[in-house]
Amino acid sequence: MKKMSDNLAFLSNPPAPQSSGISLCMLASGSRGNAIYVSDGRTAILVDAGLSGIEIERRMKSRDINPESLDAIVVSHEHEDHIRGVGVLSRRYNLPVYISAKTLAAALPLVKSIRKTVLYVCGASFQINTLHIHPFSISHDAADPAGFTITLNQRKIGIATDLGIVTAMVRHHLQSCDLLILEANHDPDMLISGPYPWHLKQRVNGRTGHLSNQDSRILLEEIQHDHLQHVILAHLSETNNTPEKALAEVCQAINPLYTQLTVSSQDICSQLVLLNSSPSESLEVCNV
Ligand SMILES: [Zn+2]
Ligand SMILES: [Zn+2]
């Protein structure tokens, strides 16, 4: 495992926290590529690597994150927008790839060889060094799609994109998170009246498609709590949604006194979000 201290020469402005908090960066989110960087200063992972390897490296470096500091890649499902850079990054940085057996079988034609695979099973937690990760099944048109919670000390991050419906299991795992990355894929009116062919509208809107802005709002109304510090809306459609529509719908479900609401982008990686480990410390967004 590489330590953050190994990278200090590279980092002109090293991302805090270095000890016990979690830092997170949405490197990309949407149908043209997804990748989330998560680190507690001792362990650094990517959840999905759906851009080219070179573009993921470029975006990490733009936030002063050294790709050499990565310890692993965790894959949610085999759609190309989630795995495009997995093979390249795995081979270039000697990274193990955590993936389910069915997803691996479906992903292999695209990712080719992987340096090392570690198979996970939805419902069974696993540990990557200091990070505790729990994959759970979601409803999506892939072989074995997964959402994740990542916990460190008493802090919990929930990640759920690419899901057609909110099941009781999804609701269960996403409750009591400190930070949520949640899909808000489309505005239903824009989808219905938009340019997609009928079969694609059916797919997006179906039980194995994607969550609408309204679906996200309803879920958040159910699981909102005072310790939910940040909600990041993700996987927005560029054709059937706008950041303004997503924010306007979902903000109805959250209390702005406690919860910050932001939207992630396809083309620009997010600011670094810092989630401190002590419950007395609040979340901050680092202007880098
Ligand atoms: Zn996707
Ligand atoms: Zn997908």
Image (cartoon, rainbow, N blue to C red):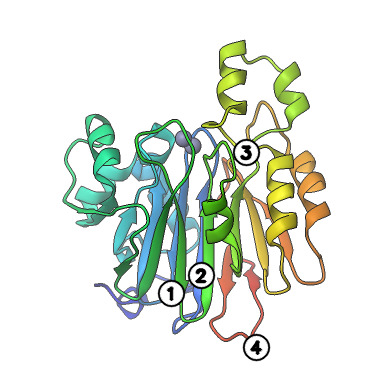
Image label count: 4
Question: Can you identify the residue that label 3 sits on?
Answer: 211
Q: Secondary structure at mark 4?
A: loop
Question: Which residue type does callout 1 highlight?
Answer: Asp
Cα distance in 3D space between marks 2 and 1? 6 Å
Tell me which label, 3 or 1, sits earlier in the chain. Answer: 1
Observer-side mark, 4 or 1, equals 4
On whether ligand 1 comes within 8 Å of the CB at mark 4, the answer is no
Task: Give the x, y percent position of residue 43.
Answer: 35, 71
Cα distance in 3D space between marks 4 and 1? 18 Å
Task: Give the x, y percent position of residue 60.
Answer: 44, 56
Cα distance in 3D space between marks 3 and 2? 26 Å
Question: Can you identify the residue that label 4 sits on?
Answer: 280
Q: Secondary structure at mark 2?
A: strand
Residue located at (55% from left, 23% from top): 203
Question: Can you identify the residue that label 2 sits on?
Answer: 23
Task: Give the x, y percent position of residue 259.
Answer: 74, 66
Q: Secondary structure at mark 3?
A: loop
Question: Which residue type does callout 4 highlight?
Answer: Ser
Tell me which label, 4 or 2, sits earlier in the chain. Answer: 2
Q: Quadrant of residue 46?
A: bottom left
Tell me which label, 4 or 1, sits earlier in the chain. Answer: 1
